[in-house]
Image: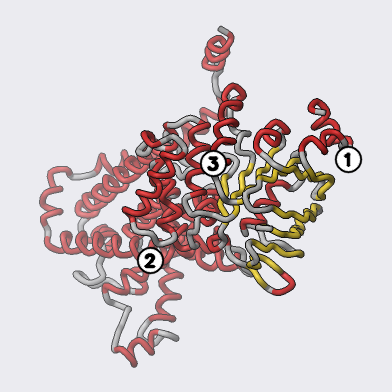
Amino acid sequence: MVLHGHVVVERNRFTLDASISVRAGETLAVLGPNGAGKTTLLRALAGLVPISAGSIELDGALLDDPDHDVFIVPERRPIGFVFQDYLLFPDMSVVENVAFGPRARGTNHEQALARASELLEWVGLGDHAEKRPDAISGGQAQRVALARAMAVSPRLLLLDEPLAALDVTTRRSVRSDLSRLLAGVDSARILVTHDPRDARALADRLMIIENGRVVQSGSFDDIAANPATPYVHELLGDFS
Amino acid sequence: MIDTNRRARRLRERPPAGVVALALLAIVFFALPFLGLLWKVPWSDVGRVLGKSEVRTALWLSIRTSVASALLAGFFGIPLAWLLARTNFPGRNFVRALCTMSMVLPPVVGGVALFFSFGRRGLFGQYLDQWFSFQLTFTVWGVIVAQTFVAMPFLVLTVEAAIRQADARYEDAARTLGATRSYVFRRITLPAIRPALLAGFVLAWARALGEFGATITFAGNFPGTTQTISIATFLALETDQRDALVLSVVMIATSFAVLLGLRDRWMGRTDGVGY
């Protein structure tokens, strides 16, 4: 078990209370309607939101545990995050974006750029290195965001709706590119989405949350065959 | 083409007459004093006045102290703005009110407060004098302190608003990549608010340049050490009006050029992507 967590986050009138575990090399898809707490779950794992109860353990190391007064700040967690709108730094070129993590961790400029170039080759954007983020397409921006997150060799990779910002016409091809790239990543992965097609194409296992609670988890086919709630039935009905 | 039709129709629409009339009056209200002043300026005297050694001294003192005050305001004001925008501590609104009060206070009152705190016999100033034989009142340092006191709030409020508006998610993204909060501040936050930084510096600088009340109360009026161009202008009004007019027009020209330049920088930036 790479990640083992019981995440409780309380916010005015909303409580997220979810247990989550991910094995090495596995992709877990977290599905749910808007406002179910999916993004909050990722933010809590990354340390951007402290949990109010429970605990988060990654590779046997405690990251967050309010009962024992443990809280590791985001910059010291071995976790990569691909944000929904990718959030590429607009004042930096593509390669500088990817080199940001290594630079922030103290790698010297040349080595950080070399590492960034390698990763850009990996995502197939080697010849876009000097471009500004506003000069590349949404699908390319997504791959830059992936390369940037992987540049710090995270043990766990979080992807928040990585396809939601894309045009419907490019979605399918970007999805298959992402699937191919994720297969080459050795970190454990959690993918948040509201689209069951993303989950089917990219994930090994599904977890469905509604209203801050886990309502069902298992393989795509099992859940599609036995939906536990009307929402799950509606969501996966077409696939069973 | 529905779109172009719609645009044409909107262009034909006139703004309400009452609003336009009042706005025009406001513009006239701002324009007339300058016309009155420009009409009176003895243009042939400009060279003579600017050639006077006491004018040059005052001008040079103003330039040095106003730049120093703007830099000091930035050095302390930017961290203060960050603290007010990005952290939540009890009494934050109280602290903001305290630190920006000198903006709305009559400058003379600020000068009096400075005098009784940092003057030679002031609550804190006496120790500066006893321990370091250092005196702020009636020195160029006093001018800088008085100007910074009055000018810093302009920078703090401008920068705080910009930090609040900057998308904090970029800062989150940077932190997940291993950047500490101070690294994020330098590499992400500051570049994102560049236009507001510039605006804050310029506003603080202009306020410092024009500062009169706090400076003359706290630092006095000594030609060469504390007599700034604003003070010199005021005094010239009593001795030689023509000098006062020339100095005023110099300051108007400077301020107007700065404001116009600032406007362009803002526009250039908002056309781009930005966040």
Q: Can residue B104 be seen in this view?
A: no
Q: How far apart are marks 2 and 3 (CA)?
A: 41 Å
| B36 left or right, relative to A72 | left
Mark 2 lies on a secondary structure that is helix
Badge 1 crowding class, 10 Å Cα cut-off, few under 14, some 14 to 19, many 20 or more, is some
Evaluate if marks 1 and 2 touch, with contact meaning CB atoms under 8 Å apart.
Answer: no
- Of callouts 3 and 1, the N-terminal one: 3
The kind of secondary structure element at disc 3 is: loop
Amino acid identity at mark 2: Thr
Q: Nearer the viewer, residue B116 or A142?
A: A142
Residue type marked 3:
Tyr
Relative to B112, does residue B229 appear above or below in the rendering?
above
Tag 1 secondary structure? loop
Q: Name the residue under label 1.
A: A228
Residue at (50, 58) in percent of width and height: B178
Which is more foreground, mark 1 or mark 2?
1
Image check: B150 left or right of B61? right
Mark 1 residue type: Ala
Image side of residue A103 versus residue A152, left or right = left
Residue B85, percent from left and from top? 55, 58
Measure the alpha-carbon separation of dots 3 and 1: 33 Å
Q: Which residue is nearer to you in this view: A142 or B20?
A: A142
Marks 1 and 2 belong to one chain: no
Question: In the rendered structure, the residue with mark 1 lies on which chain?
Answer: A
**Label for residue B148?**
2
Q: Relative to residue A172, is residue A161 depicted above or below?
A: below
Count of picture labels:
3
Q: Which mark is residue A86?
A: 3
Which residue is at 82% across, 50% downward? A213
Foreground label between 3 and 1? 1
